[in-house]
Image (cartoon, grey):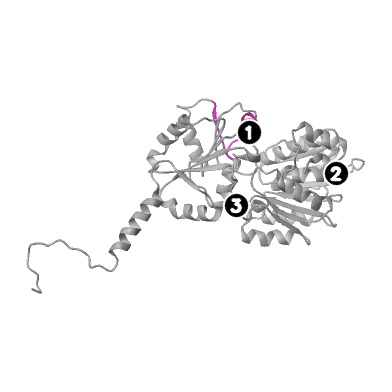
Amino acid sequence: MKFSELGLPSSILASIKKMGYDEMTPIQEVTYPIISAGQDLCALAETGSGKTAACVIPLIQKVDTALNAIQGLVIVPTRELCIQYVAEIHKIAAKTRIVPFAVYGGFDKEIEIAQLKHEVHILVATPGRLLDYLYSGIVSFAHVKCAILDEADELLKVGFLEDIEFILSCILHKHQTLLFSATMPDDIKTLAHDCLHDPQHISLITERAAPVSIEHYFAYLHPKHKQTELVKYLKGEEVEQVLIFCNARHMVDKLFLDMRKDFKDIEYMHAGLSQDKRSAIFRRFKQRKLRYLIASDVAGRGLDFSHVSHVINWNYPRGTEQYTHRTGRTGRMGRKGKAFTFITKNDIPNLRELIHKKKITPCWIGEDPFKKDSTHQKQRTRHKGKRPFRPHSGKGSKNT
């Protein structure tokens, strides 16, 4: 279905066309009538499928610009996603009088407070900074019509959950709540249901959580050989942009120091950096001024880097959902992408689960440990039930 068939206001349609949007993606087509009708919604769709625009386009149409108040609330887990989300609203609402604004930790509070007191129609926020303004009475939800939790599974985990419950409890009147994510474990689904009233449930990831546009490569090797293999791999690939994920800040720092000897236009990003530096690196990578970015999982959710051709897991992800979010930074909106993950002996059980659960077809660079396991299993089966062979010692037995 085309956006031009929706009967959108000309101001919104013109902006959408300028952004290159013509055909609706499946998640946009199936959720648009639900959101427009004001129903609560829990929607799951693979990464890079257009979930942000699916929310933003109908949300913009709900705003009354004659009313100077927050009417749309979007909550996201990270600062970078906050910046990206409000940028998308700015583009789609460019020819309207709607004022979107983002608040997040690390930015100048005086500037944020001044804008909040002046005019904001759609507020995008991280939970911590939003709580600050709620407690101090800076923001009011008296006119909120629609609240959106993006990357909802992350927001409903321990650490965020109490904050989210409190924030939503501050919207005292009847309103619409939308939950969007690429993954939703069963325990989180239960919590999600508590946030919604008579919701519609949409899932476009039931059969396959991993986008079919991504090829999944793995290398089974000793940890001390990883850097040599990584350099060899990158130099042998046609690379547009690469995201390399590590599981901890100190790993990011060390890998950056090692890799910058072999590669220029490389940077690193994690939560230990100042917000100004994180924002600058994020912007440079988006603008393709950097080719390689080594990052913690602060860059693993929701961020739309359109030209990332390769995602590399330096450390094996902590769980199948994390793998989905990380690798989803490539192969977005149907483009082709490659995911390359280093595997050690301890990762094999988790990898088996990943392949089974996400229906991934693995491509091995070098040794395939599963074939090795299969060979050993056949050997064990072949000798099962036979008396073990013991070489003759040459000495007589006590029983002879």
Q: Residues within 10 Å of mark 3 (few under 14, many from 20)?
A: some
Q: Which residues are magenta?
A: 265-286
Mark 3 or mark 2, which is nearer the start of the sequence? 2
Image depth: mark 3 or mark 1 in front: 3
User: What residue sits right under mark 3 in the picture?
Assistant: 208
> Left of 219 or right of it: where is 170?
right
User: Considering the numbered disc 3 on the image, is that residue within a helix, a strand or a loop?
Assistant: loop
Locate residue 60, reporting x and y percent.
83, 42
> Left of 334 or right of it: where is 29?
right
Which quarter of the rendered picture does the C terminus lie within?
Answer: bottom left
| Tag shown at residue 282 | 1
Locate residue 335, reporting x and y percent.
62, 37
Give the Cα separation between the discs numbered 1 and 2.
30 Å
- Identify which amino acid the numbered label 3 is placed on: Arg
Q: Nearer the viewer, residue 173 or 223?
A: 223
User: Considering the numbered disc 1 on the image, is that residue within a helix, a strand or a loop?
Assistant: helix
